[in-house]
Amino acid sequence: MTEDDILKSLSTVEEPDLKKDLVTLNMVKDIVIKGNEVSFTIVLTTPACPLKDKIKKDCEKAIHKNFENAVVTVSWSSNTTSLRVDKKEVLKGVKNIIAVVSGKGGVGKSTVASNLALAIAQGGAKVGLMDADIYGPSVHIMFGVRGERPVMRDVDGKGKIVPIERFGIKLMSIGLLVDEKQAVVWRGPMVSSAIRQFVTDVDWGELDYLIIDMPPGTGDIHLTIVQTVPVTGVIVVTTPQLVALADAKKGIAMFNQPGLKVPIIGLVENMSYFTPAELPENKYYIFGKEGGKKLAMEFDIPFLGEIPLVQSVREGGDIGIPVMMSDDEASKKAFMEFGDSAIRGISMKNAMMPDEVVAETI
């Protein structure tokens, strides 16, 4: 075996999403051959890549086709893809910024954003979660950090807020800075100023993904976010019923406007069906069936999955232990599948879209 032989074999292995071979994509590194043993490293587009096992099996199969007795060792490294066009040089250490949005309140957007962040982090990525819902913050409750206060740190001569860390996620929410008993009664400019501070005055450090839990609807905060930072893409959360779908359309339409130029990663349907704990195989479509999937088809955007309505999801958010950190395997599986779909969608957007369309501020 020679290095050229190995490269020739691996040139037949296709990256499942990008539809090009690993060699053409420059994903094969550090080939070492000793007798009948060969080892090499595959450079993934994200440490949270859900396709590792398939890629590994395909590599082994390709090499064994030409060298039957070869002992193949595959190692992994990652270089999280990013096509952020950052004219203002804010959040330089953050590779991808993902906004989680909904057209209306009550669809479980914060629950989805929180568990998405955890699902991605469990794949090995560095993840932050920013709660941009100034009037109704909930991330600090869902992660069990109520009453905690972030500290300040000097970074390059400037005082910056250090995010709270919980379950391996960096967190920032207005709920960590104000008394829960006090209502945030601010006009639009004050809210926009606070959001800018969450971006520029927080020491987020190096992150593969910053998930932003946006407020419901379409308004000032949404515009402030896309004007302040280049957002890689948007994930839309809806529930199956007609009212939620109608409002989700407005959210999709907002980010489809030519001036915003923010790609939509896809749509996820929350509370898709109810599954009682004592009947885990049963599905009851309380709010209707496949409304989210039909809406995704209507707008020609990816459908990222269905999240069931399960009691443990609600309980986990209330007690500060998100379902991704619980023993509810069925719900965890739904969020992991959703997270995998989201990660693949982000990687594909970064790989396939021209720079001028991706993550550009207005």
Image (tube, rainbow, N blue to C red):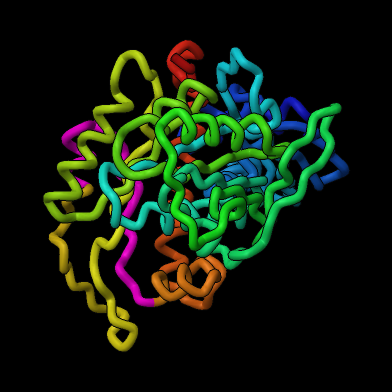
Residue at the (59%, 17%) spot, across then down:
86
Front residue of 164 and 52: 164
Image coordinates of residue 109 in percent, x first then y, are: 37, 52
In the image: residue 243, left or right of residue 159:
left
Image coordinates of residue 158 in percent, x first then y, are: 80, 29
The segment highlighted magenta reads 293-311
User: Does the magenta-highlighted stretch encompass residue 294?
Assistant: yes
Image coordinates of residue 1 in percent, x first then y, are: 78, 35
Specify the quadrant of the image occupied by residue 288.
Answer: bottom left
Could you tell me how many numbered marks the image carries? 0
User: Does the magenta-highlighted stretch encompass residue 187?
Assistant: no
Above-or-below relation of 133 to 270: above
In the image: residue 180, left or right of residue 93:
left
Image coordinates of residue 182 in percent, x first then y, are: 48, 57
Specify the quadrant of the image occupied by residue 166.
Answer: bottom right
Above-or-below relation of 66 to 54: above
Front residue of 140 and 78: 140
Furthest toward the bottom, the residue is 278
In the image: residue 195, left or right of residue 128:
left
Above-or-below relation of 149 to 39: below
Front residue of 29 and 202: 202
Above-or-below relation of 256 to 239: above
Residue at the (55%, 44%) spot, across then down:
130
Q: Quadrant of the C terminus?
A: top left
Q: Is residue 250 visible?
A: yes
